[in-house]
Amino acid sequence: MDDGIKVAGGTPEQKAAAASQIAERQAEAAQAAQAERVRETQRAEFEAAAARAIEAAETKRRGEEAEAASVAEAEAKAKADPGAEARRMLDEAAELRAQAESERDRLQSLGNDYDARLKRERDRDRVATLRRMGAIGGVSDAHLLMIAPDVDPETVQGKAALDEWRELNAGLFAGVVAPTIPSAEAMISGMPRRQSAWGTYDREYFARIWRDNFGGE
């Protein structure tokens, strides 16, 4: 591309000047093309933004028109039936009240179930504690639960209440028998008669050791 500059012959200086002019014009043409591409990109972005803005405005307009139509319809119904709005509000209030009552009943049922489970567990603990305290087998678990204090045996106060009740109703509990120490004769009566060559370890020797240490006959 010569961009209209032709050099026929001429000195080297003239040829160099002509080549420089050609290069400058080519650079200017490239810059112009780049600027045009930038303008095209900006124009496309502007058009896209404008389209989005128009679409958003149209959507907003349709929403406002729908809302206005709904309000107008409600106002028309209210004029045709003045009590319609009041009935609607009453219906909503009744629905909310029904929901609240249902939730209250559900929570109360859960609370009752929880209390019943705790009561069963505490009754089992009461019976187990009373049995460990020696409650006789002739008194059934159900009877014990009816007559014993309704307390938590896991607490200090509950255990003390059961201990006091046991003292007041000793006939319902098996007596505690203290262990007895057998006599020397009872301990050694079954021992075989063995003794050393010196006669040291016979039954009489063990009986004497027993009497010396534990007393008894």
Image (spheres, grey):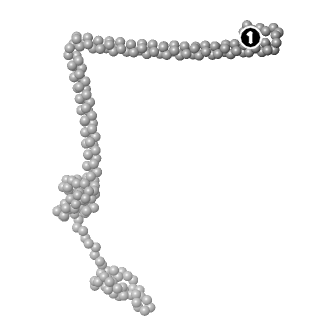
Q: Can you identify the residue that label 1 sits on?
A: 1
Q: Amino acid at mark 1?
A: Met
In the picture shown, does residue 80 fall above or below 202?
A: above
Outermost bottom residue: 198
Determine if residue 151 is in view: yes
Work out which quarter of the rendered image holds the N terminus and state it: top right
Secondary element type, mark 1: loop
Work out which quarter of the rendered image holds the C terminus and state it: bottom left
- Where is residue 111? Give x, y as percent: 26, 42
Neighbour class for label 1 at 10 Å: few (<14), some, many (≥20)? Answer: few
- Where is residue 192? Give x, y as percent: 39, 83
- Where is residue 78? Give x, y as percent: 23, 13
Determine if residue 143 is in view: no
In the picture shown, does residue 208 fall above or below 66?
A: below
Residue at image location 27% in from the left, 38% down from the top: 107
Residue at image location 73% in from the left, 7% down from the top: 4
Question: Image quadrant of residue 63?
Answer: top left
Horizontal relation, residue 204 to residue 42: left or right: left
Q: How many marks?
A: 1
In the picture shown, does residue 217 fall above or below 55?
A: below
- Where is residue 155? Give x, y as percent: 26, 56
Q: Give whichever of 74, 162 is nearer the camera.
A: 74
Q: Give whichever of 198, 66 is nearer the camera.
A: 66
Residue at image location 39% in from the left, 15% down from the top: 60
Question: Image quadrant of residue 127?
Answer: bottom left
Q: Give whichever of 56, 77 is nearer the camera.
A: 56
Residue at image location 25% in from the left, 35% down from the top: 104
Question: Image quadrant of residue 210?
Answer: bottom left
